[in-house]
Each structure stands twice: as structure tokens, then as C-alpha cells.
Amino acid sequence: MSMTFDIQPASNPTPEKDRIAKLVDPGFGRVFTDHMAIVRYNQAKGGWYEARIEARANFQLDPAGAVLHYAQEIFEGLKAYKRDDGGVNLFRPDANARRFKDSADRMAMAQLPEDVFIEAVEQVVRIDRAWMPGGEGSLYLRPFMIASETFLGVKPSSEYIFAVIASPVGSYFKGGPAPVSIWVSENYTRAAIGGTGAVKCGGNYAASLRAQAEAIQHGCDQVVFLDAVERRYIEELGGMNVFFVFDDGSLSTPPLGTILPGITRDSIITLARDAGKTVREEPYSLDQWRNDAASGRLKEAFACGTAAVISPIGKVRSVSGDFDISGGAAGPVAMGLRKQLVDIQYGRTNDPHNWIRKVF
């Protein structure tokens, strides 16, 4: 299914002087561009209709809108990167479009065709290209869908709003990636088998916030969750996947099922295997993590995701004791993979898996 977007440029775009000032230090997710993409869905009207690019504005939503009561909501996160020649790259938007469709299926929501998802993202990048930061900055794109039917009965909505908004973001780490500290959540779990752990829905993140607050109370940057059944095995951070690097050069990462199938995670597995490294997708317990860090078998641990790409993990804290990984320093495997991935995203090196989609 292809849709033609009706382009309606903003009548009052941000003045150039103000835009330039905002791009000096945009932070993450606090500055927004002038436009958004909108596509509506109505079962009675036969599906998706009215695809538009328009000025970013508030939604009109009835107080009985389904999303407000039953949390039928999904989202994605991806970035547009400015190349040295002035063009712009998207990184694996087809993978985001597929995952968005899978999320919709699990949440009993209407499935947006993948080509409409990609076209909406590209149109926002095109109309707001002046908002692209330079250097290690990027344009963060947030496609999302909410249930908009007005009713209070518990059933899948028959109406949805799909939208894409954009936010210029600076480099996630000022002065290079610094190792983060991790708090092990032993009271709260993120997801169980058969649940929505593999879905990018707001409810998963809401459920992680109390544990994240606990991590901050203990002086840590991030929280890591254990499995819901045995409370032994490492699953993922509040919003990132995790990898372990061993003294034989191999890598390990928790298996899919109850965790988000991260696109950065998948890219790292591919790049590591390209380099001849063994990558295992298998359960890894907190006790193993602690013992391997103490014995020196574990050389590095790092988290990965769209926002930070790769974050080295330097310290792990828990009720049962703290431990450091490789003296708390960023390791060569994590930093090497990060450079390789970022160079592909910005078009500085070859792209052997055709991950890059050039917008212009």
C-alpha cells in the first residue's frame, strides 16, 4: 500500500535565528522541529486515510479517548544522520517499520504498512532538514501510534492516529562515552514470557520508571532487570540491550523473547560476527556476571540502543554487593564496535549490509 502525503508547510516556522540558537546545545528530546506527519485510521472508513505533513500542533483528543484509559500505544525511535557531503542518511528504517508492525499486532492495533511508515519518516526529514545538527548530532525521529476512538469499553480501538515528530539531538556523551553505573533491580521485573516485553509500548517504560528511580537513589545511571521467573538471569536495562565480552574474544547477549529486539543489538551481533567473533544469545546470570568480573574472564560489558549507540558499563551495584568491570574503564571491543557503527550511520565507511537509506 502506498499513500501520497499532502504537504502543508507551517505558516509560522521557527525563525532562523531562533532555530540556530536552539541547535547549539539541543540536549535530548527537548527541542522539536516545525512539522509532523499524521496518518489516520478508521475501521468504518476502510482503514488508513488522510496522510499529511503539517505544522507540529497539539492533538484534539476526547477525554474518553481509548489511549488514555487502556494504553493502546506504541512507538519507535530512529535517527537521521548528516553526511559530510551534506546529504542525510537513515539507518535501517525498514527494521523499525517491521518492529512497529509487530508491536501493533501484539497490542491489537491496526498495522501500518511498512512503506507508509518509511515515507512518513522521510517526509519529515525532508521538510525539516534545516533542523539537522552538525558534528555528532542527529535528528531523532519518533514515530508513534495511539488509539483515538471515544469509548470506555475494554476492546481494541477502531480508530488510530499515527504520527512522526522530530527532535534535533546533540552527542549523547559530551567528551566521549563514559562508563555508566548499573543498579540491579531485584524487586521489580520488566517483562514475563507471553507479556509485552518484546513490544515497544509506553507501558513497558512506565513499569520501569520506579526501578530507574531506585537506581538513581543508589547513585547509579541505569537499572538492569532480572528475569521474572527465577530472578537470576540478566534481561535488559530500562531502555537498552546489554552485551558481555569475554577473555576469549567472544560476546554474549540475553536471548530474545521477553526483551526488546533492538536494532542496534542486531547490528552489533552482525558486525561482531563479520569480524569473526563468536556471539552467543543465551541466558547469563547475575552470579555469573559477578564471578566472571572477579576472575577476569569477563573483560567488558556494555549497553546499546538508538540514543547512546553503545554505553560501556563500568560498575554494577546491587543489594548483594557491588563489583567493577575492567577497573571501570571503557573497553576496546565496545569502543571499536561503536566507532564502526557510527561510521556506517554517518556514511564515513562502506555499508556491507545495505543498512543505509539515503533521504537525499
Image (tube, rainbow, N blue to C red):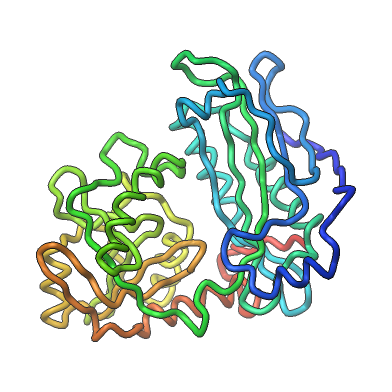
Depth check: 139 or 254 in front?
139
The total of numbered circles placed on residues is: 0
The part of the image, by quadrant, that contains residue 238 is bottom left
Question: Measuring 17% from the left and 64% from the top, which residue is drawn there?
Answer: 318
Q: Quadrant of residue 212?
A: bottom left
- As drawn, 264 above or below 229: below
Quarter holding residue 136: bottom right
Residue 230 shown left or right of residue 302 in the figure: left
Most extreme residue toward the right is 11
Q: Answer with left or right where residue 201 lies relative to residue 8.
A: left
Q: Position of residue 343 (x, y in %)?
A: 58, 77
Name the spot of residue 241 as percent of width and height, x first: 37, 60
| Residue that lies at the very extreme toward the front in this rendered image | 217
Q: Residue at x 41, y 51 (%)?
A: 261
Position above or below: 144 against 152: below
Q: Quadrant of the C terminus?
A: bottom right
Seen at 73% across and 67% down, the residue is: 132
Q: State the residue at coordinates (41%, 77%).
A: 275
In the rendered image, which quarter contains the N terminus? Answer: top right
What percent of the width, then of the height, locates residue 9?
Answer: 87, 48
In the displayed structure image, the side of residue 214 where residue 72 appears, left or right: right
Q: Up-down: is 302 above or below 41?
A: below
Across and down, in percent, residue 121 comes to: 69, 50
